[in-house]
Image (tube, helix red, strand yellow):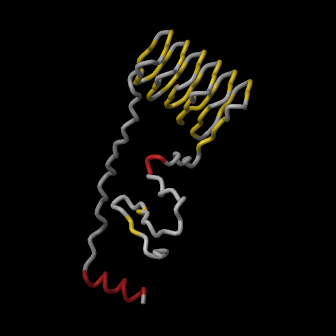
């Protein structure tokens, strides 16, 4: 038996031999086929959730459910997932739409409309990407990227030299300190 002598291929997968005790085991899946890992500080509104009213958050947000009302999400990233339906205006740093949106988008960054997105509303943003297969009805207002104020150092006035002291005066001062 080759119970402890497993052969591994160049991808790190076990190679099954004829004398293995584990004939029905599948090889370890490759990284590309594994589900994506959820990042920290991301909230998900699931497909069965319905929220009516104003929504605000201080973390990245993925909407797979239904939202009716304004979404205030400044400085953060907002994704309307494939199952997501939003009826209201969105204010976010960057927005990705894969689902349905009936309302305006106000973004200080990038707006992406993916294949399958259905947007009816105006878009105000710095950059936009519309994938082939996305539907959008409205107007767009491209803004210039806001420049962060440049901080310049103000030089301090040079230090004024103090009174000139003799070597004896310095030695006298040191002696007093000891």
169 vs 32: above or below: below
Q: Quadrant of residue 104?
A: top right
Residue located at (45% from left, 26% from top): 112
57 vs 161: above or below: above
Q: What count of labels does the image hold?
A: 0
61 vs 112: above or below: below
User: Going by the image, does 154 lie left or right of 4?
Assistant: left
Instruction: Specify the farthest residue to the top.
Output: 138
Q: Position of residue 96 (x, y in %)?
A: 50, 28
In depth, the one of 151 and 25 nearer the eye is 25
Q: Position of residue 59 (x, y in %)?
A: 59, 41
In depth, the one of 144 and 171 nearer the eye is 144
In depth, the one of 157 and 26 nearer the eye is 26
Q: Position of residue 10 (x, y in %)?
A: 33, 61
Q: Quadrant of residue 12?
A: bottom left
Residue located at (63% from left, 22% from top): 86
User: Going by the image, does 27 lie left or right of 41?
Assistant: left
Q: Position of residue 57 (x, y in %)?
A: 64, 36
Residue located at (25% from left, 82% from top): 167
Instruction: Specify the farthest residue to the front.
Output: 18
User: Which quarter of the rendering shows the C terminus?
Assistant: bottom left
């Amino acid at each position: 038996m080759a119970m402890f002598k497993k052969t591994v291929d160049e991808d790190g997968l076990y190679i099954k031999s004829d004398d293995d005790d584990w004939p029905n085991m599948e090889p370890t899946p490759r990284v590309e086929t594994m589900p994506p890992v959820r990042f920290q500080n991301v909230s998900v509104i699931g497909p069965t959730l319905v929220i009516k009213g104003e929504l605000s958050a201080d973390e990245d947000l993925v909407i797979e459910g239904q939202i009716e009302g304004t979404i205030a999400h400044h400085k953060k990233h907002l994704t309307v997932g494939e199952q997501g339906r939003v009826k209201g205006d969105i204010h976010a740093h960057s927005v990705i739409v894969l689902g349905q949106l009936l309302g305006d988008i106000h973004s200080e960054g990038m707006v992406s409309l993916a294949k399958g997105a259905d947007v009816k509303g105006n878009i105000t943003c710095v950059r936009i990407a519309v994938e082939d297969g996305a539907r959008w009805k409205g107007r767009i207002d491209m803004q210039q990227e806001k420049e962060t104020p440049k901080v310049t150092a103000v030089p301090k006035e040079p230090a004024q030299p103090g009174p000139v002291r003799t070597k004896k005066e310095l030695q006298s001062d040191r002696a007093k300190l000891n």
